[in-house]
Image (tube, rainbow, N blue to C red):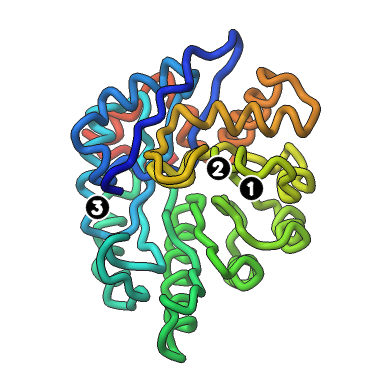
């Protein structure tokens, strides 16, 4: 993310605005120098909490430590992404070894996490190079869905270039508490997820697409807000931040012909429904992180 510009456009929220960022990467190295400021600015914009996902087991400790520092805001999600490797490095398809290393760490911290994620499928040709790569991704996804079911946790899901296969796999594996983030499949495919009770989160990049067919088709009862920070901001090549979900909220409210405060209320209620750990927003999660409380 070198050379990105920090967005400073989002200011204080309107009265009655309370939002949850349901998918972001606050342990990305682009936040290393100013994460406390980023979180403070998000709070000032009306963001009450953020589900912070991981992509590899090497990020697990960093996100748990961030949650200890900000127990009233950061809700960690642990999972193994279908694509491994830095954005600027040599990316590759996930392997079974990657998830096998992760599972024991996830289980050791299971009571402290809000979801399993970021998990899913990514069928971009540059990632699925070998004939077996798609099947390996499906196996890794099933292992993590089974883990989520074992501990009654939701899953925070990636589905790039694999919208239909991802929803089909989730249904096949029996996942029933699902967030599909930044879904890039066809709206008709998304509606099969809606029929299964799945939720879809909309990032600030939506403002670049004035006629989003996905936002038009999705019922508000299945919509959540996300930033996907530091990616998918309102402008390309700009570091995205959780505060920018206010832009998503305004965009969706306009297209659904709702008041922004009402849309924020609906999406926050949806988030609480899917992620029960968010009920601790006002109390924080420090006790959980310190005493290893049982999963709620």
How far across and how far down the image is residue 278, in percent?
47, 32
Which residue is at 60% across, 55% downward? Answer: 183
* 81 vs 103, nearest the viewer: 81
Residue 107 versus residue 216 in the image, above or below = below
Which label's residue is closer to the chain start, 1 or 3?
Answer: 3
User: For residue 64, what is the image quadrant?
Assistant: top left
Crowding around mark 2 (Cα neighbors within 10 Å: few <14, some 14 to 19, many 20+) is: many
Per the model, the C-alpha gap separating discs 1 and 3 is: 25 Å
Which residue is drawn at the image coordinates 30% and 34% (left, top)? 288
Mark carried by residue 178: none
Mark 1, Cα crowd under 10 Å, few <14 / some 14-19 / many 20+, is many
| 141 is higher (above) or lower (below) than 177 | below
The disc, 1 or 2, on the residue closer to the chain's N-terminal end is: 1
Circle 3 or circle 2, nearest the eye: 2
Secondary structure under badge 3?
helix
What is the CA distance from the residue labelled 1 to the residue labelled 2?
18 Å
Q: Which mark is residue 205?
A: 2
Disc 1 vs disc 2: which is toward the camera? 2
Q: Give the percent coordinates (x, y) of residue 289.
A: 26, 36
Is residue 43 toward the left or the right of residue 56 in the image?
A: right
Rendered view: 95 above or below 207: below
Q: Position of residue 61 (x, y in %)?
A: 20, 48
Q: Which mark is residue 199?
A: 1
Please tell me which of labels 3 and 2 falls first in the chain. 3
Q: Residue at horizontal 40%, vertical 40%?
A: 238
| Residue found at x 27% / y 76% | 97
The answer to which of 21 and 249 lies nearer the viewer is 249
- Name the residue carrying label 3: 59
Is 148 situated left or right of 216 in this image? left
Task: Indicate the position of residue 180 as horizontal and vertical percent values.
Answer: 58, 54
Tell me: residue 104, above or below residue 223: below
- Left or right for 114, reference 20: left
């Amino acid at each position: 993310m070198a050379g990105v510009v920090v967005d400073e456009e989002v200011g204080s929220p309107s009265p009655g605005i309370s939002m949850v960022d349901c998918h972001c990467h606050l342990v990305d190295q682009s936040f290393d120098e100013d994460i406390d400021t980023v979180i403070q600015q998000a709070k000032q914009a009306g963001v009450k909490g953020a589900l912070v996902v991981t992509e590899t087991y090497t990020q697990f400790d960093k996100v748990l430590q961030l949650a200890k520092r900000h127990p009233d805001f950061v809700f960690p999600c642990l999972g193994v992404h279908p694509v491994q490797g830095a954005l600027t490095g040599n990316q590759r398809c996930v392997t079974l070894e990657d998830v096998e290393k992760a599972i024991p760490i996830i289980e050791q911290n299971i009571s402290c996490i809000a979801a399993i994620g970021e998990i899913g499928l990514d069928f971009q040709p540059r990632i699925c190079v070998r004939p077996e790569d798609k099947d390996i991704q499906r196996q890794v996804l099933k292992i993590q869905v089974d883990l989520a079911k074992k501990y009654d946790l939701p899953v925070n899901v990636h589905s790039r270039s694999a919208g239909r296969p991802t929803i089909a796999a989730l249904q096949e594996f029996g996942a029933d508490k699902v967030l599909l983030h930044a879904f890039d499949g066809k709206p008709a495919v998304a509606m099969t997820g809606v029929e299964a009770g799945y939720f879809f989160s909309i990032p600030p990049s939506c403002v670049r697409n004035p006629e989003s067919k996905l936002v038009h088709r999705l019922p508000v009862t299945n919509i959540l807000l996300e930033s996907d920070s530091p990616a998918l901001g309102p402008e390309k090549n700009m570091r995205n931040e959780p505060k920018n979900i206010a832009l998503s909220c305004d965009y969706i409210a306009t297209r659904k012909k709702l008041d922004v405060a009402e849309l924020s209320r609906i999406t926050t209620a949806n988030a609480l429904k899917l992620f029960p750990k968010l009920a601790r927003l006002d109390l924080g999660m420090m006790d959980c992180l310190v005493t290893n409380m049982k999963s709620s």
